[in-house]
Image (tube, rainbow, N blue to C red):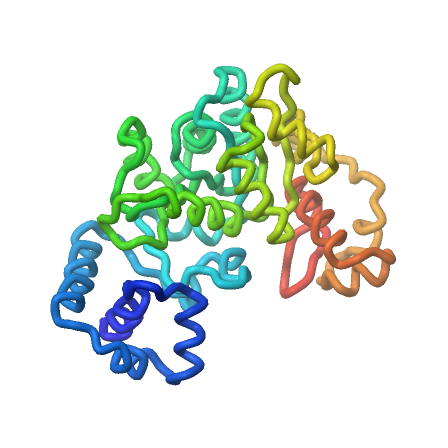
Amino acid sequence: MNDLLNKLLILRTSGIGPVKYNALLKQYGDDVAIVNSLSLDSAFIDGVKREIDLAYELNVEYICDTDSRYPKQLKAIKNHPIIITARGNIDTLNKSAVAMVGTRHSTAAGMNFISDLSESFVKHGFAVVSGMAMGTDAAAHIGALKVSGNAQTIAVLAGGVDYIWPLENESLYYEILERGVVISEMPVGMKPNTQNFVQRNRWVAGISDLLILGEADAKSGSMTTARFALDYGRRVFAVPGHPSDSRSEGPNSLIKNGTATLCMSSKDFFSDEKVGAGKKNIRPQNEILDKLGIIPVSESVLANLVKKSVSEIKSELVILELQGLVRKQDGGYVLI
């Protein structure tokens, strides 16, 4: 408890985020010394203690980046949150994840497409990540929840993990708690502000293995999320739309300039769709698959074998893993 309190006392202090925290840790050596250097008043300390008490009342867990439950993809990002809060099934954070984002003003066709795509990913063992907003986000979560199970979707919130926003998604929020997990880096009980949504978008992209962009205006939070994903080395897919619809400007532009891959259906990711019991898939010709067997081969070794960059190999391995052709094992990849 004292370790958690000390970390939160530092992180809840105005002006201290991951960058400043790490600098202070390097300067002072440990959290206790940092807290002592801050000269915090009793009212502030009591406020942080109340936050912790409220979290435990609501079954909210604090997960530090030194905890094995902390999402591995998120931890790999520079200046990731030192602590996140989580409410629901924590095991969901250990699954491979795909982010699906788009406009709050999605068309019915756009929402149906994202919902069906989300359902397909969950059937193939992935958790679907989104921001629990209206429109595309809600469709992504709803599609994931169509599949039976209790580790299906991750909602990343801009406010406290207990603060339901928008209120129209209250019932969805509680369903996600039952069959997924809600996470945030903000204090429990905190109402989101504009800047928080930008941070939320960073972590939606960061926690995922790849991102799919649905309908989105050219200047939108969803496009920002896609750019974060690209910055983090994630593969980005985009769903095309009619040129005259402003909601298609975002994905169409990414497809046009080559920064996103065209997404037409779940068949872009899965060759089997898990149909036809007992049928065996014919493995496609692929130079990476030709180099794999039952002994794990690392990304760097594969890159050398096929004369490609590690970043190219990473992107191709994501697709092969999504298609159920390879699996990561002991720091390398093997054929399935």
User: Residue 130: which quarter of the image?
Assistant: top left
Left or right of residue 217: residue 20: left
* Residue shown at the point (63%, 32%) measured from the top left: 238
Residue 109 x/y as whole percent: 53, 16
Left or right of residue 219: residue 40: left
| Front one among 106 and 15 | 15
| Front one among 242 and 321 | 242
Residue 299 x/y as whole percent: 73, 61
* Residue shown at the point (49%, 49%) measured from the top left: 202
Image quadrant where one finds the N terminus: bottom left
User: Residue 293: which quarter of the image?
Assistant: bottom right
* Residue shown at the point (72%, 35%) measured from the top left: 280
* Residue shown at the point (58%, 48%) measured from the top left: 209
Left or right of residue 233: residue 173: left
| Front one among 13 and 299 | 13
Residue 195 x/y as whole percent: 39, 47
Residue 188 visible: yes
Residue 125 visible: no
